[in-house]
């Protein structure tokens, strides 16, 4: 029973992630092979990037694959390519609260702080409680010499007893 429940939850997760599954062991045109996606998720470094690029080429309309490709590229510190992948994921319909946060992080790494500010504002519009987006916005403002605007954003986070509070202080 436990194995069946775990398997059911796994399939449910994939379905919720908007990844169509193949049936009967045969890949249907346009469907994502779950084992290929699983290999990409388990891989690290340049191998993960290679696998996600192959999946993205085979499934150009998948926002999830583009989003995960962005994550693999970000981990490899290829922020320019990660930004392009995240923007494509946004264009394909990935929810703003996640993708705009990642776009903001890439832009910050590329020192494009005005654009980063705009991305964090979009992330906060989609998820007003996002601590990561608030911190990113405060940082983007600070790096643009907008200390008066950055201060209240960061001061809101400072009392927190976690890393976000420590970073904000």
Image (cartoon, rainbow, N blue to C red):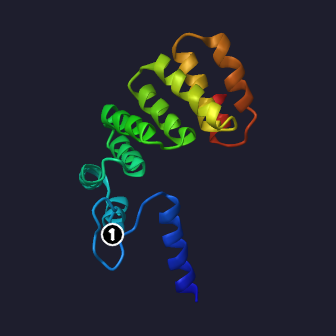
Q: In the image as oriented, which residue stretches furthest toward the bottom?
A: 1
Q: Where is residue 65 in the image (x, y as percent from the top left)?
A: 37, 51
Instruction: Name which residue lies at 67% across and 43% down.
Output: 162
Please indicate whether residue 49 sits to the left or right of residue 112 in the image. left
Q: In this view, does 61 lie above or below 155?
A: below
Q: In this view, does 52 lie above or below 26?
A: above
Q: Specify the quadrant that holds the N terminus.
A: bottom right
Q: Is residue 135 above or below residue 63?
A: above
Q: Specify the quadrant that holds the C terminus.
A: top right
Q: In which quarter of the image is residue 106?
A: top left
Instruction: Name which residue lies at 32% across and 66% down.
Output: 33
Q: Where is residue 86 in the image (x, y as percent from the top left)?
A: 41, 38
Q: Where is residue 55 in the image (x, y as percent from the top left)?
A: 28, 55
Please indicate whether residue 46 sits to the left or right of residue 21 in the image. left
* Foreground pick, 55 / 134: 55
Q: In this view, does 162 lie above or below 29?
A: above
Q: Can residue 167 be seen in this view?
A: no
Q: In the image as oriented, which residue stretches furthest toward the front?
A: 29
Please indicate whether residue 11 sits to the left or right of residue 54 in the image. right
Residue corresponding to mark 1: 35
């Amino acid at each position: 029973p436990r194995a069946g429940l775990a398997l059911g939850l796994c399939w449910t997760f994939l379905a919720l992630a908007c990844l169509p599954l193949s049936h009967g062991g045969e890949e249907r045109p346009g469907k994502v092979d779950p084992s290929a996606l699983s290999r990409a998720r388990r891989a690290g470094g340049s191998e993960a990037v290679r696998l996600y690029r192959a999946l993205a080429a085979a499934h150009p309309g998948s926002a999830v694959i583009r989003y995960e490709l962005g994550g693999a590229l970000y981990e490899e510190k290829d922020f320019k390519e990660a930004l392009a992948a995240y923007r494509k994921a946004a264009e394909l319909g990935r929810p703003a609260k996640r993708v705009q946060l990642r776009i903001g992080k890439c832009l910050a790494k590329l020192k494009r702080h005005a654009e980063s500010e705009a991305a964090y504002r979009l992330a906060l519009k989609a998820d007003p409680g996002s601590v990561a987006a608030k911190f990113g916005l405060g940082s983007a403002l600070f790096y643009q010499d907008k200390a008066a605007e950055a201060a209240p954003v960061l001061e809101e986070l400072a009392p927190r007893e976690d890393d976000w509070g420590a970073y904000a202080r």
